[in-house]
Image (tube, rainbow, N blue to C red):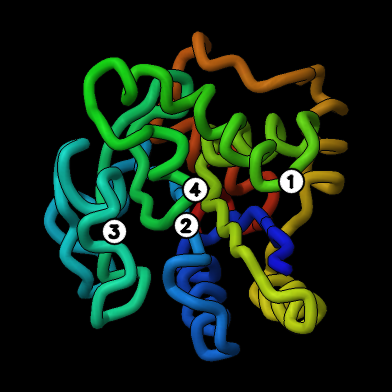
Amino acid sequence: MLKTVTRLFDDYADATAAVSDLEALGVAHGDISIVGSNADKAHGAHGIDGHDVHDGVSKGAVTGTLVGGAGGLLAGLGMLAIPGIGPIVAAGWLITTAVGAGVGAAAAGAAGGLIAALKDAGESDEDAHVYSEGVRRGGTLVSAKVPEELVREAEATLERHRSVTAATRGEAYRASGWSAFDDKADAYSPEEIRRERGLHTGVNGQL
C-alpha cells in the first residue's frame, strides 16, 4: 500500500535534491511529483539546472509524455501558468492529475485541480490549501507516493533538505490573516516572491 508524503520547500534547489534522494531511496519516478513557482522567472524558459524545460501546456509534465524518462523525474520538467499561482515548473503525477490530459479549459482550472489532486492523494482540505498557497508564494512542493515500509525514510529525506509541513507553514500564514487559497487572487510578483522567501529563509529574500 502506498502513502502520500508531501512537503513544501522555500528553496528550489533543496526540493530537487530531495527528489533525487527519494529516487535513490527506491521511490519510483512515476510516484514522485514536483511543483515549483516560477513567478520570479528564476528558471527562465530554456533550462533548469541542466534539464531541458518544455514550454507550454502541451508538453513535458503537463501531458506526462516526458515524466520518468531516462534522466529521472527532473528530466521531464514542463512549464505552464495557472490562475492564482502564476508561472510554475512541474513534473509528475500531481500536476498531471491537476491539469488533466487536455489543455485550454483544463489548464484554466488547474489551480483548483491542484487542491483536488492533493486531497485525492490523501491530504486534508486544510493542508491542500496551505500547500497550494505555498507554491503561490514562491515555494516548491514535493509529493511522493511511498510504500509503507519507506514512509519514515522518505519523511526523513524531505526533512533533511529543509522542508516544512503544512501545519507549520499554515500557522505562519494564518498569523498574518490568511485563511484559504484563492485561485482568483493575483499571482505574486517577483518582488513579492523574494520578500516572502526572505521571511522564511532569513537571507533578505535571496536563496
Is 167 left or right of 9, judged from the image as shown? Answer: right
| Callout in the foreground (4, 3) | 4
Label 4 and label 3: CA atoms lie apart by 13 Å
Which residue was labeled with disc 1?
Answer: 122
Q: Nearer the viewer, mark 4 or mark 2?
A: 4
Q: Residue at x 56, y 79 (%)?
A: 27
Q: Residue at left 49%, top 55%?
A: 206
Q: Which residue is mark 3?
A: 77
10 Å crowding of disc 4: few (<14), some (14-19), many (20+)? many
Residue 69 % position (x, y): 26, 74
Q: Which mark is residue 34?
A: 2
* Three-letter amino acid code of the residue under disc 4: Leu
Comparing 160 with 194, the one in front is 160
SS type, badge 1: loop
At label 2, counting other C-alpha atoms closer than 10 Å, the crowd grade (few under 14, some 14-19, many 20 or more) is many
Tell me: residue 169, above or below residue 148: above
Q: CA distance from mark 1 to mark 3?
A: 24 Å
Q: State the image quarter where residue 171 is shown.
A: top right
